[in-house]
Amino acid sequence: MDRKPWELPQESLKNKTRCQVLVRHAVKIGYLEKGNCEDCGDENTEAHHPDYTKPLEVIWLCSLHHHKRHYPNGPQVRSLG
């Protein structure tokens, strides 16, 4: 059965998780193609969702630049105390 990526069950998935699942499925079935990092051109990329209400609109980033998009002021350090 051929399904569109947005036809996957949604009931128990939170929005962020749902978006991640939809993108993985869309890539797997060839509906969406992974691209190079928008910032450096690296081929090893991850999908970044600027807007979780648009699950298939992603920016392809390497892990370094993906982290920088989430934490533009440097790494987030958790207190151990």
Image (tube, grey):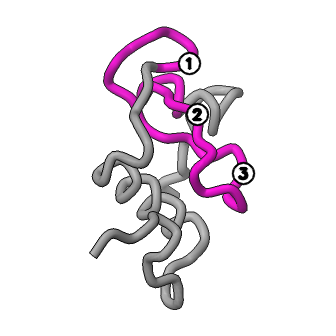
In the depicted view, which residue is nearer to us: 38 or 68? Answer: 38
Question: What is the distance, in whole Å, between disc 3 and disc 1 at their CAs?
Answer: 17 Å
Residue denoted by label 1:
38
In the structure shown, which secondary structural element does the residue marked by tag 1 occupy?
loop
Identify the residue shown where x is 46% and y is 62%. 22
Label 3: few (<14), some or many (≥20) within 10 Å? Answer: few
x and y percentages locating residue 33 in the rendered image: 40, 36
Numbered mark located on residue 59 in the image:
2
Q: Which residues are magenta?
A: 37-66
Identify the residue shown where x is 49% and y is 88%. 12
**Along the polypeptide, which appears first: circle 3 or circle 2?**
3
Q: Is residue 15 above or below residue 45?
A: below
Q: Is residue 75 above or below residue 25?
A: above
Q: Amino acid at mark 1?
A: Glu
> In the image as oriented, which residue stretches furthest toward the front?
1
Residue denoted by label 3:
51
Label 1: few (<14), some or many (≥20) within 10 Å? Answer: some
In the structure shown, which secondary structural element does the residue marked by tag 3 occupy?
loop
